[in-house]
Amino acid sequence: MRSATILFERNLTFRKVILDYLSKLFVQAAGISAARAAFDLPTRLARLIRMLHQRTDGDTIDITHYDIARLLCTGRPGVTEALHHLEGIGAIRATRGSIRIRDQLLLSQAGDLNSPDRLRNGRGLRRL
């Protein structure tokens, strides 16, 4: 630990890389917290699926309900309900352990943070 402290104090390049990383990490954590507090689960799920889709080849994402729940800090049953919602509008097709993007435009609209009906209301999440 002492050597890391010395490296941090003496090496300006190392210090800049670490501080830049931490800054980006905190901004991302703040964004996730804000989205969790302000937007309903189907909206957050649509955004997550779009983000994962951008980082994979093809239109199929191999991921379980459990992994999605952990990424969104929510329960697995809520993920199942939100996936059913996104399937119902025709944006995705969810099967055991994978999600296939059927309509990117619909998925994008479902994850649009500018839509007022995506906001939580004073009584909790809006009904699906």
Image (cartoon, grey):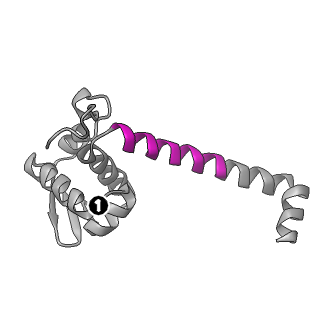
The quadrant of the image that shows the N terminus is bottom right
Kind of residue indicated by mark 1: Gly
Q: Residues within 10 Å of mark 1 (few under 14, many from 20)?
A: few
Front one among 10 and 40: 40
Which quarter of the picture shows residue 53?
A: bottom left
Most common secondary structure along the magenta stretch = helix
Which residues make up the magenta segment?
A: 22-38
- Judged left or right of residue 25, residue 59 is left
The quadrant of the image that shows the C terminus is top left
Above or below, comparing residue 46 to residue 99 in the picture: above
Q: Secondary structure at mark 1?
A: loop
Q: Residue at x 25, y 35 (%)?
A: 118
- Residue 121 colored magenta? no
Q: Residue furthest front?
A: 123
The residue labelled by disc 1 is: 75
Relative image position of residue 3 (x, y in whole percent): 87, 70
Q: Residue at x 30, y 54 (%)?
A: 49
Q: Residue at x 16, y 63 (%)?
A: 94
Tell me if I can see residue 62 in this picture: no
- Judged left or right of residue 66, residue 10 is right
Above or below, comparing residue 44 to residue 63 in the picture: above
- Residue 23 colored magenta? yes
Relative image position of residue 23 (x, y in whole percent): 64, 46
Front one among 90 and 4: 4
Q: Residue at x 22, y 40 (%)?
A: 110
